[in-house]
Image (cartoon, helix red, strand yellow):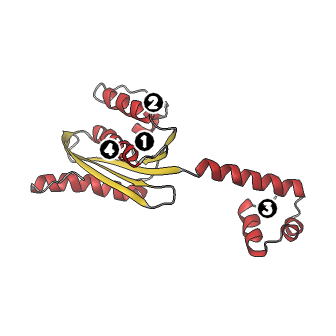
Amino acid sequence: MSRPAEIFEALAETLDPVQVMQRFGLSREELQDLLRQAASAWQAFEGNWLLYVDGASRGNPGPAGAGAVLYDPLGQVQKRGSRFLGRATNNVAEYQGLLLGLALAREKGARRLQILADSELMVHQLNGRYRVRNPGLLPLWQAATKALEEFDAWSISHVDRSLNAEADRLASQAIDQARQGSYNDT
């Protein structure tokens, strides 16, 4: 079978399902199945808020900050936040970024949340792939798992740091502003 994207593009161009079925050699049942799969995928996506979170530490441990950016299901930024954390490790800052982001999501009424973070450790710990061995992270992991229970559905995935630039900028900005004495919790 051809790629579904090609079939959908052809349907959008022609608005003629019979022509598309002939062009791609599809039976009526195959096209119906493809449309049902698309509807199911859209329903799974629909209503999801997107949350980017990050933490930064200069010195590890050192001056640390947390940042988060929340997008509504239509892709519009609904809330940005940052927090200076004082002296902390990078892993602590990552969890604090998540907790900040979850608070923003609750504040905006999000019920279904897709979380993206560049901390593989945190993502794997929250997905149950890694155990939390660091006693300093355990209370943060517990707070995060408890906060996540308040959502109807959630997932957390690792993204490359380059795709998490705004949350990273907010975390670093909190550190810079604190050092300059002009920090304002946002």
Q: Is mark 4 on a helix, strand or loop?
A: helix
Q: In this view, does 164 lie above or below 8?
A: above
Dot 2, how many residues are within 10 Å of its Cα: few (below 14), some (14-19), or many (20+)?
few
Q: What element carries label 2?
A: loop
* Residue 147 x %, y %: 39, 34
Which residue is tagged 3? 2
- In which quadrant of the rendered image does the N terminus lie? bottom right
Q: Nearer the viewer, residue 21 or 146?
A: 146
The span from disc 3 to disc 1 (Cα, nearest Å) is 35 Å
* Residue 106 x %, y %: 39, 43
**Hey, what amino acid is under mark 1?**
Glu
The span from disc 1 to disc 2 (Cα, nearest Å) is 10 Å
Q: Which of 165 and 100 is in front in this view?
A: 100
Choose top left, top right, bottom left or bottom right for residue 145: top left
* Residue 116 x %, y %: 45, 48
Q: Which residue is at 43% across, 57% downward? A: 163
Answer with mark 1 or mark 2, whichever residue precedes in sequence: 1
Choose top left, top right, bottom left or bottom right for residue 95: top left
Q: Nearer the viewer, residue 163 or 77?
A: 77
The reply to whether discs 2 and 4 touch (Cβ–Cβ < 8 Å) is no
Answer with mark 3 or mark 2, whichever residue precedes in sequence: 3
The span from disc 4 to disc 1 (Cα, nearest Å) is 18 Å
**Hey, what amino acid is under mark 2?**
Tyr
Q: What element carries label 3?
A: loop
The span from disc 4 to disc 3 (Cα, nearest Å) is 44 Å
Which residue is tagged 2? 130
Q: Which residue is at 36% across, 46% downward? A: 107
Mark closer to the observer (2, 4): 4
Q: Which mark is residue 100?
A: 4
Q: In this view, does 58 lie above or below 142?
A: below
Which residue is tagged 1? 120
